[in-house]
Amino acid sequence: MPDVLVASTRFGELQIADDELLELPSGLLGFETFRRFALLDHDGSGTYYWLQSTDEPDLAFLAVVPWPFFPDYEPEIDDDVEHALELTDAADAQVLCLVTIRAADDDPERTVISANLLGPVVVNLRTRVGAQVVLHDAKWPVRAELVGA
Amino acid sequence: MLVLTRRANQSIVVNGDIVITVLEVRGDQVRLGIKAPRHVTVHREEVHAAIEAENRQAAAAAAAPPLPRPPAAADGD
């Protein structure tokens, strides 16, 4: 299958190979009609990724692999979700948490970068199909600040 | 909005395949049971709204500022 070309707003013209494409059949909450994304490693480190919509050049989400920052993170994925994503092998699963960047409430000069641990995006890397899952355990914050080394 | 009044143990059928049952009414809380096909997601509204709002905020990032590096692993392998 030929590469997909996307004239993205943030990254310019992108050529997306098959193995970088993802399908989210239900999109993301609030963005249900956007189902096709490119999964791009932000800086080659395997920590941060971009989900770039291949249908809407201006739509992209920064995401982070949660465990380097939150080693105790244990998202419980329902059987129904595992079934829908055909996740029979845990090694095929990639979990990414969407990152938001905002000014701190108490200090507009300070930028707070946080990850949504309550609504992770779970991807089956083998089938290239994913979904945003809403976890049932309220202990996972929707804004978990990323604190660096 | 369709408004219906139910007692405990009464139900509502949505779309022919989703059943919402009032299990118990105690004080100002209502306990609801929801039976739905596997592909249908069901969540507390405020949780759904919070994730939607956070997604919208996430979509607004035009570019990434310098991003935090993860803390080094404690066991240093």
Image (cartoon, rainbow, N blue to C red):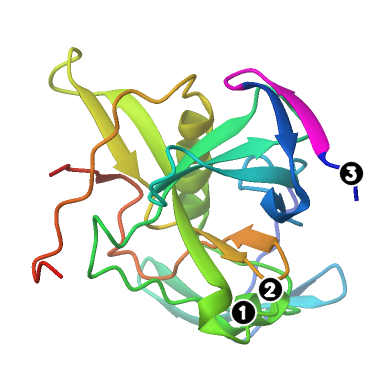
Q: Residue at x 48, y 62 (%)?
A: A95
Compute the Cα span from label 2 to label 3. 25 Å
Q: Which amino acid lies under the numbered mark 3 shown in the image of this protein?
A: Pro
Magenta-drawn segment: A4-11
For residue A85, the mark is 2
Report if residue A32 is visible in the image: no
Q: CA distance from mark 1 to mark 2?
A: 5 Å
Lower sequence index among marks 3 and 1: 3
The verdict on a common chain for dots 2 and 3 is yes
| Amino acid on which the number 2 mark rests in the picture | Leu
Rendered image quadrant of residue B19: bottom right
Tag 1: Cα neighbours inside 10 Å, few (<14), some, or many (≥20)?
some
Q: Horizontal and vertical percent for residue B10?
A: 66, 82
Q: Which residue is mark 3?
A: A2
Tell me: residue B27, above or below residue A23.
Answer: below
Q: Is residue B54 visible?
A: yes
* Residue A18 picture location, percent across and down: 77, 52
Residue behind mark 1: A82
